[in-house]
Image: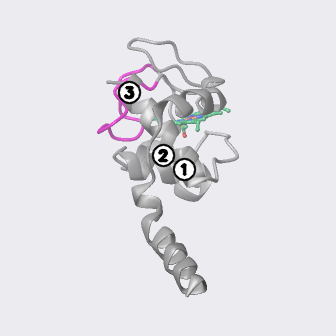
Amino acid sequence: MKTLLVSAVLSALTIATPAAVLAQDATAGKKLFRRCAACHTVEESGTNKVGPNLWGIFGSQAGARDTGFNYSKALKDSAIVWDDETISAYIENPRKVVPKTRMSFAGMKKAGQRADVIAYLKSMTQ
Ligand code: HEC
């Protein structure tokens, strides 16, 4: 009986945590964003560093915002529109999504961390 209960609880947990419903935590995302902040600012009219300023990134087309940044042709030609899903895939493995992108970032492998960074990014860039 006890075993049955435990396995019922375990399967309920498994069902409740697919990547798509991970809770987003912008506060945790702020810390994680330090990895991005080496190359990116988020505030309106912020400077470009190694990477472009990210103000207004949600809903924009890759490499198309008027930031004055010298985007790679690969990024501009990708025709990606940035939303939670496309940003998540890009920061998981930039070169898998845009093979010749100039973003040299090893990738953030944990879905929960990506969700938190995206929540923070959304809270700061619009
Ligand atoms: C080592 C520097 C570096 C780091 C670290 C980095 N990026 Fe980038 N990022 C870039 C560069 C350079 C580009 C432009 C790529 C190109 O033109 O191909 C870019 C582009 C982007 C774009 C697309 C911008 C646009 O206008 O289309 C997004 C979104 C982005 N980065 C998010 C992030 C996030 C979020 C992180 C942290 C998880 C991160 N980056 C970490 C350098 C970096």
Checking the image for residue 115, the label placed there is 2
Query: Does the segment drawn in magenta span residue 65?
Result: yes
- CA gap between label 2 and label 3 equals 12 Å
Which tag, 3 or 1, sits closer to the chain's start?
1
Checking the image for residue 112, the label placed there is 1
The quadrant of the picture occupied by the C terminus is top left
- CA gap between label 3 and label 1 equals 17 Å
For the point 57% across and 77% down, the residue is 6
| SS at mark 1 in the image | helix
Is disc 2 in contact with disc 1, using a CB cutoff of under 8 Å?
yes
Give percent across and percent down for residue 38.
66, 24
Rendered position, 87 above or below 38: below
For the point 48% across and 45% down, the residue is 115
The foreground one among 16 and 78 is: 16
Q: Which residue is mark 3?
A: 123
Residue segment shown in magenta: 54-68
On whether ligand 1 comes within 8 Å of the CB at mark 2, the answer is no
For the point 43% across and 42% down, the residue is 76
Which tag, 2 or 3, sits closer to the chain's start?
2
